[in-house]
Amino acid sequence: MWVVFWFEIRFNTDFTQFGVRPGKLEGLRGILFGPFIHGSLKHLFNNSIPMLVLMSALFYFYRSIRWRILIIGLLITGILTWVIGRPANHIGASGVVYLLASFLFFKGIISKHYQLTALSFAVVFIYGSLLWYVFPVDPVISWEGHLSGFLVGLTFAFLFRGQYVEKKKFEWEQDDYNPENDPFMRQFDDFGNFIELKPELEIESLDPNDSQSNTFAESQQPLKIHYSIIIKKNNENI
């Protein structure tokens, strides 16, 4: 998107004509080209940040279906915009943004996965105001593209049920978990009080046939100390 915008500024050209043009066959090319074309720097910036955040969430939590959601969703959103849109050039990646936001929100609610549910509320908290722009509140904004992306994302959330990142279970969530075998849990009694455990000493038996053991055993022999007492008699003159 940024490369296309830079190309327009650098070579003083305008790609708006390559957007989605409802009612015309040449307008179908905008299904592929429209999301990469933006009318201003503000328009580009407002779509870039949500795209980065939402695509990161899609690619992390829904790795098995991420490309299908993105590519097929982009195509269907563009086609639906071409069908219901006003006779104008519809440009920008906002339709894809609404697609991702809608899919992530409804998919998280349906899955009942705590991480995905939290992601859904995060999407609402950050981009909840986007909902107003699926209605014709501003004649300059392509609300048809927004509505198309929203409906496609909602539909995908029901079609791709059960396709999400596997929930990781901790050791204590396993069915065969036994607290008595857990070194950490053994430090507490039945009432949750901390118990100071004495370290367990392991004593290895020595094998008499082992050369290393014999060397160790020989080194443990009693140490004999010999003392020599020398008595020197001084001669005294009388």
Image (cartoon, grey):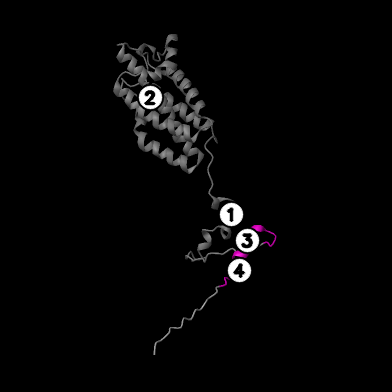
**Mark 2 to mark 3: distance in Å?**
79 Å
Q: Earlier in the sequence, mark 2 or mark 3?
A: 2
Q: Mark 3 to mark 4: distance in Å?
A: 10 Å
Res 40 visible: yes
- Find out whether the residues at labels 1 and 2 contact each other: C-beta distance under 8 Å: no
Q: Does the residue at mark 3 contact the one at mark 1 (Cβ under 8 Å)?
A: no
Q: Earlier in the sequence, mark 2 or mark 4?
A: 2
Q: Nearer the viewer, mark 1 or mark 4?
A: 4
Where residue 177 is drawn, which disc sits there? 1
Q: Earlier in the sequence, mark 1 or mark 4?
A: 1
Dot 1 falls on a residue whose secondary structure is loop
* Label pair 2/4, CB-CB below 8 angstroms: no
Left or right, 132 with respect to 228, comes to left
Can you say which quadrant of the picture contains the N terminus?
top left
The magenta segment is: 207-224
Q: Amino acid at mark 4?
A: Gln
